[in-house]
Image (spheres, rainbow, N blue to C red):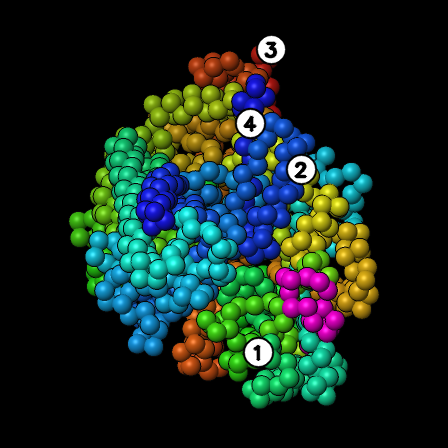
Amino acid sequence: MLGNNRHKTELNLWVMPNAGYTTKSILQALIQEFEGEHPDTSVRLTVYPWSLGWSRLMEVVKGRYLGALPDVLQVGTTWVATLAHLGALERVPESNWLSDNEDLSTYIWDPGENNETGQELFCLPWFIDVRVLYYRLDLLDMLGLAPTALQDWSGFTQVCGEVKKFLSRSGPVPTILAPIALPGQKPGVQMHDLAPWIWAAGGDFCTPDLRQASLLDQPCVQGCEFYFDLIHHGFMPLSSPTLPQGHFFTGHYAMQFSGNWPLQDFLNPSSTYCARDVAQKFGVALLPAGPQGRFTFLGGSNLAVASVSQNKALAWELIRFLGTPARQLQHARLVGGLPPSVASMEPLFEKHPAAKSVFWASFAHARRLPRLIELGSIEQIILKMGARVLDLIRDRSYTHKRLYEEIKIANEEMNAVLSLHRYSGHGLVTGVP
Amino acid sequence: MTALRALLTYEDVLRSLQKQMASAPIDLPEMLEAGLGYLASRFRLGHVSFFMWNPHNETFTMKFALYSGTLMEGDEEIHVDSQSGLDPLIKEGRPLVISKKPWVAYVPLHAGDRLIGALRLERARSLPKGKVLASLTPYSNKRDNQRRELPLLEEIADIFSAKLAQLEREERNLTKARYLQANSEVATAIFERPRLRDMLECVSKSIVQNLGFDRVRFYLVGPGKKELKGVVGFQMPGRPLDLDRESYPFELGVNTLVDAVLSQPNNGGVHVRAIDRHILYVPMVANRQVIGCLAADNLLSQQIIDNEQREALKTLAGVIGMAVVNARLFEDIEQQAITDGLTKLYVFRYFQQRLREEIDRADRYSYGISLVMMDVDNFKNLNDAYGHLLGDKVLEFLAHTLRSNIRRIDLAARYGGDEFVLVLPEITQQEAWLMGARLLNALKQCSLKTPSGEPIPIAVTMGAAMYPADAKNARDLIEAADRALYWAKKNNRGDICFFKKTELTAS
């Protein structure tokens, strides 16, 4: 009786919908296990949309958030440096934060790289995201195209054109509705959606000294044009009531740029979650090479302790619990992501050596976003620019000239944000990671 | 019987929904998660979506959709035209069942008479047979079903509309409370902190914390309207900003900040920088003169500055402008009271006060202070030979040399007549000696001449003592330095000597 009435410490865990609508049920299973090991603790799980995440965390930072404050946070790699700079995240305790037998060197990237100095740790990687291209082998076969056609920008655009033409004739693959599915779970056009194309064109978001925006440099503009043209030409259509935003593995799309490895459930041919036939008919390729090379984006999500937490030791316990290689793998399998360490990733590709080799090759072409304390803010600027450009596409007023005007606004906004460190007295950011 | 049972169940469900919504948090997503979650579970719905209505382009934009207990952001827009079938929702403001299989209904949400959004309720699959309780469309009798369905949806609309209105009200009240708090704190700062920098530091902190800006900075027009100079600021979450080093020529085209201040008379007092409403410049005016600018921004958070924040800042800027003028007057008077008219160095009284404060600080942070006393050698002879006007020039020159050769943290004061004193905090005896030697050397470069054109040699003798090594308090320290000076005058004129308890030694 006494046991039931015992006062429990409540830990607030804030995560994003990593597995869409099933996020809650997936995490609840892990949480129950944690609560079993910590009978005096109850974990309150909040799944909140990506679109709300940034402003919600800013409200927490400003002390204006009215709800229950978080103890443990899922933080995207783009947000870590900014949140750390604002004092929203706790430093990882020097000892005892990694699980037993865990070695930082086995991580795909050093978690310290998330913040601007690279010296201090503010989070533990939870899962990672490296962009590859999924495609339908059967469709390419029907069109008489080899996957090698997807190697570079021009070949890729040609394939998109062929697929679109083919789909308009209502071919023998009736479930496929469009050439490319929009990437990721986050709505809109994100910084990391544009990054590989900008890099492949030889551009970047900032100058090498990270002091100025370089969005107006020709290669950067070219990368943006390539990506938005895919949407404008209807190769990667925006969602609508008749064409919901989807996932390659639902079988409605011929291709998708994605950082996910399909759900474990999907790889089981009897799965009802995804289109059954896709399981035998998909291929994985590196992102097409641009004029200046082949690049892909490497990012992901981390777990951090909020500095407003009243139960920091327990919060680190929860992170430690969720961060064991076994649980990272378990979680990655369920949400369709990649665990952050090489060791945890191996079993995921056991039966898919071809896909594994593409993912491994992708790491060689992968880049991170610039290491800036203002990166979280810059991400918001790019997101807003993307939204404005999508509006132009919806209104059928998209042209390269109009796109350039939007890029120009974003460039000016970025420069305003980048000028912040001149005032704030925390020193200049130097060096490219 | 079935109809009655179902009717009662509906009432129960509505009551429970009302209860759920009443206890839901004051946060839109959490409120929707609780309310829509309850609807979904009781009515066995698949997706439940929340749309916001935009009357300008007559479009419903999906904000959130709930499925399996998880709320996610939506990415759907429905333009309401004759094709959409949603016309009655807008024109008659009543719920609408637009499809029976699968069952899909729209429920309009209102704030008063104004349409603010809609809920879309969707049932993906049909109900198992025999399930009647708490389900929409439960009856075999279709007419009965339709008759009851719409009132139920209207009740749901009312409950959600009421909660949304409550959220809007509470948010408005909270905002008002924060603005009042800001006003009150700013007023307190103005009354309690007469010094400019101190007052502006406190004001910027209050504005950031209560009005929700990322950063607030104060710039003031410099003397002669030649420059706009940074003063202080505050940055979330709790970082004061020292803007002393920021200074811009006060002319058009230098930067947007200066432009905003210079163009003030024509734009109604507030300048919102074009780049996406994240920067706000509010010129401060007092006595019809632009005296500076208050700059607020949300660059890091990228939150949009709304009209209320803008208006609140505009009101505060007026009050702060007057307070700046008053603080400057206070500082002018204070300056006159604490500075010597001839040499512009601090007077004896102020020196004593600052020495005590520096000793307190030295105790707190465990560092040493050096007190250097000095007087001009043969000053009486100089006055007698060339007159008091030239004597004054010598004192002015000496004061200027002192000011130019000490650090920002040091203090130089006129002790009386031709005697001067330096308070040098955070210094060792060796460093104090070096500074004294540098001063003696600088004085040798004197370019003053007698009326007949002969150079006037200025020599000064210095006596110094260290705290806490030589004294336990301010009085003892002055006495020790004075004794060192006396000894130097007697034994080592024109040089610097340090006090020692056993003996006095020349450097």
Q: Residues within 10 Å of mark 1 (few under 14, many from 20)?
A: many
User: Is residue A58 rendered magenta in the image?
Assistant: no
Residue located at (23% from left, 64% from top): B92
* Above-or-below relation of B484 to B92: above
- The Cα atoms of the two marked residues, 1 and 2, are separated by 42 Å
- Residue under label 2: A33
Split into 4 quadrants, where in the image is the N terminus of chain A?
top right
Viewer-side label of 3, 1:
1
- Residue under label 4: A8
Closer-to-camera residue (B298/A161): A161
- Circle count: 4
Percent of width and height locating residue A398: 45, 80
* Above-or-below relation of B462 to B220: above
Question: What chain is tagged by disc 2?
Answer: A
Task: Please report whichever mark, 1 or 4, sits nearer to the chain's N-terminal start.
Answer: 4
Q: Residues within 10 Å of mark 4 (few under 14, many from 20)?
A: few
Q: Secondary structure at mark 3?
A: loop
